[in-house]
Amino acid sequence: MGSTFPCPECSGELAVIAGICNLHVTGDDRIVNLLQCVSCSRWFLSEWVDAWLSTYVDVVERDLGPLADKDAQDLLKEMNECPEPYSKWCRCPAHGTAEGLISRLPVRNSRSEQRDV
């Protein structure tokens, strides 16, 4: 399973193709996954942030996109070359590219919930 949301284009399943961890502005981990629909082959990103705040955890999940095929292929190549994909401290090109895409792609689906700690 790649995303809790269906493909916004055809309602097919979104599969995780690659992923990295970025540093969120709160200092928490931000998991960014490159997704591809198993039915229509469109590309998307999912963003998952688990922000620890003083008395609760704010969990945010968003699907963004679609990505142009070239953007997705370029990001996939960078993600596959990343020496530490799940280190939020890694500064290889993949982390910057993912950050740039997140800032410009439309949000297709999102959910947020707060959990007591």
Image: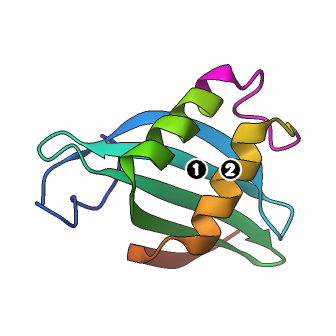
Total number of numbered labels? 2
Task: Indicate the position of residue 86 as horizontal and vertical percent values.
Answer: 71, 34
Disc 2 vs disc 1: Cβ atoms closer than 8 Å? no
Task: Indicate the position of residue 58 as horizontal and vertical percent values.
Answer: 64, 74
Q: Is residue 111 toward the left or the right of residue 28 in the image?
A: left
Q: Main secondary structure of the magenta part?
A: loop
Which residues, given as a range, are shown in magenta?
80-89
Task: Indicate the position of residue 5 as horizontal and vertical percent values.
Answer: 28, 62
- Give the label on residue 97, or none: 2
Residue at 17% x, 64% y is: 9
Residue at 49% x, 66% y is: 61
Secondary structure of the residue carrying numbered label 1: strand
Residue at 26% x, 50% y is: 42
Where is residue 101, by image quadrant? bottom right
Where is residue 19, by image quadrant? top right
The three-letter code of the residue at mark 1 reads Val
Vertical relation: 90 (above or below) 24: above
Q: Nearer the viewer, residue 68 or 103?
A: 68
Vertical relation: 29 (above or below) 107: above
Where is residue 7, by image quadrant? bottom left
Q: Is residue 68 toward the left or the right of residue 13 in the image?
A: right
Label 1 environment density (alpha carbons within 10 Å; few <14, some 14–19, many ≥20): many
Mark positioned earlier in the residue sequence (2 or 1): 1
Q: CA distance from mark 2 to mark 1?
A: 11 Å
Q: Is residue 81 magenta?
A: yes
Residue tagged by mark 1?
A: 32
Label 2 environment density (alpha carbons within 10 Å; few <14, some 14–19, many ≥20): some
Residue at 40% x, 64% y is: 65
The three-letter code of the residue at mark 2 reads Thr
Secondary structure of the residue carrying numbered label 2: helix
Query: What colour scheme has been applied to the protein in the rendered image?
Result: rainbow
